[in-house]
Amino acid sequence: MKRLISIFVLSLLAPIATYAVKAYFHYAPFYAPTIGIYVETYLAIDPNSVTYKVNNEGKLQASVEVTMLFKNGDEIREYRKYNISSPEIDTVMNEKAQAFIDLQRIPLLDGAYNFELKIKDNYSLDSAAFTHKDILTVTIPKDEMAFSGIEPAEYFTPSEIVTKYTKSGLNIIPYVSNFYPENMNTLNFYCELYNINNEIGENGDFLIRYYVTSIPSRRTFEKTISFERRKASPIVVISKGVNIKDLPSGNYNLEIEVRDKNNELLLNKKHFFQRSSSKKVEAPTDFTKIDLEESWVLKYSTVHEMAIHIKSLYPIAGKVERGFIESDFTAKDLKTMQQFFINFWESRNSLAPENEWNIYLKQVELVESLYGTQIKRGYMTERGRVYLQYGSPNQIISRKYLSNYKPYEIWHYYKINDKSNRRFVFCLVSQGTQDYELIHSDMVGEMATEGWADIMKGEYMDANSGNVFDDEYDQLRRDYGQ
């Protein structure tokens, strides 16, 4: 098996002293006609973080105990407890230790699960256990077109022998990380597409498009784009390697599109990853050279209309683009604005830029109806900006009529990129408006405020008296998930 994580050399017969087990975890839901929906869990244990002992064969070997708990509400739906042993190391040959990988297939019903993972070193009483909590969302419609989860792979090869790593005739070794260092130039992955035959007919022609987009700007990197023509069937197997050689360091989404023979988008799937590279960021396109003749953007024919649309792009724009968006436009800038606007969307979807804009425009119109005020457009408010940048939250808790706290909303995202359980706290700090301000978030890059609950205290609540109104304070803590 190829090495997944950095390796180390063991001293002859010497146990490794460790302080905490280190592991990497990933999961992906799949569907099989004979099983129904099941979740594959992938673990990679860092060999530097566990203790090795001599086994009965005279070889060095590590062992960890894994506990998995799947809860739906207060009910335990699935429970697993088992041991994993590392590959043996021949001390005479002075072999190098490598990460050891575990894969489990666990049948589950549709739903969201509170997941708890604990990994304990069986050979070290002093080592701290690895713990991980997450919300796992398992949703694959029975008769509708849908993707499985995405399984990143270190590599896959055809296999005639069935092992626990075998699916669809392929031996797939999971790559249990979302981080790709500079020496990895290909992102390999496996996934499945279900029920497309119900949409376009058995053996109907369709196209799969693969590409990488930057976060948060959603820019498409042309060198990552590739296509495959496929035939429709109940289960379409997708195993692919995407070229990431020229990507500079940053956060990205691998995107997979399914399009019909008329090039209409049917389905899209995203997978977050991080890239470390010495490659330089490409210079932005000189949009002022774009030819606008017969372009769809010409229907926006006034500076006022164009300015509104351009400023609505701010939540998803890159750093350079935001500099242009913040400009004070005049009548002479109309052509430049149109050129910027069409370049913005062509860099995100070269096949159908207008369609991409129309999809985003619907989101802008939604936040306008939900969060717009008399003096601010919806995309200029904090709630509107967060919605456009991160998408719809999985849960919104709204409290408007409190005795001792100002009205507030707490947004809960089960997943943002590689971050789990991110929350945004909005409060109506200024009475007489409907413009809720973002006062705290645990999302990287957002405002994190110590003592944010004090900002939410009402006018007649003494800020120095402590949390004497236990019921409302306890409710606030429960709303936040504490």
Image (cartoon, rainbow, N blue to C red):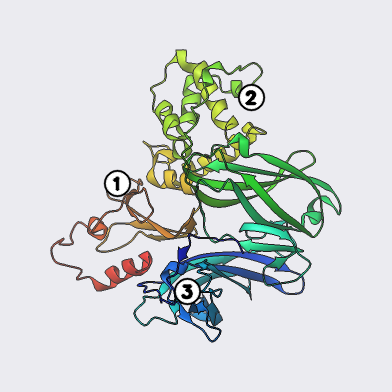
The answer to whether residue 211 is above or below residue 417 is above
Amino acid type shown at disc 3? Glu
Q: Distance between the residues labelled 1 and 2?
A: 41 Å
**Upstream in sequence: badge 1 or badge 3:** 3
**Residue at x 57% of width, y 67% of height:** 42
3 or 2: mark nearer the eye: 3
The tally of labels here is 3
Would you say the residues marked 3 and 2 are in contact, meaning their CB atoms lie under 8 Å apart? no
The residue that disc 3 covers is 116
Q: How far apart are marks 3 and 2 (CA)?
A: 50 Å
1 or 2: mark nearer the eye: 2
Relative horizontal placement of residue 404, taking residue 302 as reference (left or right): left
Name of the residue lying farthest toward the right:
203
Instruction: Answer few, some or many: residues within 10 Å of disc 3's Cα (few below 14, many 20 plus, some between 14 and 19).
Output: some
**Upstream in sequence: badge 1 or badge 2:** 2
For the residue pair 191 and 298, the one nearer the viewer reads as 191
The residue that disc 1 covers is 432
Q: In which quarter of the image is the N terminus?
A: bottom right
The answer to whether residue 376 is above or below residue 38 is above
Q: Which mark is residue 296?
A: 2
The image position of residue 150, as x and y in percent, is 62, 58
1 or 3: mark nearer the eye: 3
Instruction: Answer few, some or many: residues within 10 Å of disc 2's Cα (few below 14, many 20 plus, some between 14 and 19).
Output: few
**Upstream in sequence: badge 3 or badge 2:** 3
Amino acid type shown at disc 1? Gly
Relative horizontal placement of residue 474, taking residue 195 as reference (left or right): left
Relative horizontal placement of residue 185, taking residue 479 as reference (left or right): right
The image position of residue 449, as x and y in percent, is 27, 54
Q: In which quarter of the image is residue 107?
A: bottom right
Name of the residue lying farthest toward the front:
92
The image position of residue 473, as x and y in percent, is 27, 68
